[in-house]
Image (cartoon, rainbow, N blue to C red):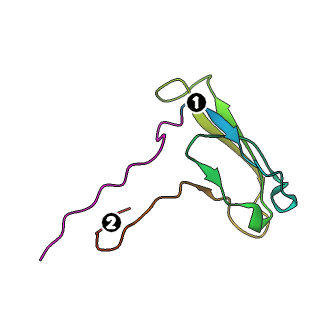
Amino acid sequence: MARADTPVELINPGMEAPYNPANPDNTATSGLVSGVIANGWSDNSAWAGATVQYSQETANPHSGSSCQKVVVTSVGTGPVQFIQAIQLPAGNLYTA
């Protein structure tokens, strides 16, 4: 039996306000990650020693009133990971 794709809704795909601290716990392992990230999004780069600064850009967004600005000055030992966690219940077909 063929299954249809299961849509997964992102939180705040347009990266509009509010913006939250990129390093809310101020942990030592993520001290190189700073700034603010659009609600619904987060950073998972601390493990790699990346130096990344996030900010809300309002001067020239492609649409809406803001967009996410990301400035990477060092990738450390791994990539910068700007992510959104989603739930993928078993038994569905997902396409990224």
Q: Residue at x 61, y 38 (%)?
A: 68
Name the amino acid type tagged 2. Tyr
Q: CA distance from mark 2 to mark 1?
A: 28 Å
Residue 92 locus on image (x, y percent) = 29, 69
Residue 38 is inside the magenta segment:
no
Q: Residue at x 72, y 46 (%)?
A: 22
Residue 34 locus on image (x, y percent) = 79, 46
Q: Which residue is mark 1?
A: 17
User: How crowded is the residue under tag 2: few (<14 C-alpha within 10 Å), some, or many (20+)?
Assistant: few
Q: Height in image: 54 above or below 82?
A: above
Q: Is 68 displayed left or right of 53 in the figure?
A: left
Q: Residue at x 84, y 57 (%)?
A: 27
The picture quadrant where one finds residue 78 is: bottom right
Q: Residue furthest left?
A: 1
| Secondary structure under the numbered disc 2 in the rendered image | loop
Q: Residue furthest right?
A: 28
Q: Height in image: 8 above or below 58?
A: below
Q: Quadrant of the N terminus?
A: bottom left
Q: Look at the image and give the residue range highlighted in magenta.
A: 1-15
Name the amino acid type tagged 1. Ala
Q: Residue at x 46, y 28 (%)?
A: 63
Q: Height in image: 61 above or below 27?
A: above
| Secondary structure under the numbered disc 1 in the rendered image | loop
Residue 55 locus on image (x, y percent) = 70, 36
User: How crowded is the residue under tag 1: few (<14 C-alpha within 10 Å), some, or many (20+)?
Assistant: some
Q: Residue furthest bottom?
A: 1
| Pointer 2 with pointer 1, Cβ within 8 A | no
What secondary structure is the stretch in magenta mostly built from?
Answer: loop
Tell me the tag on residue 94: 2
Q: Nearer the viewer, residue 74 or 95?
A: 95
Residue 87 locus on image (x, y percent) = 44, 62
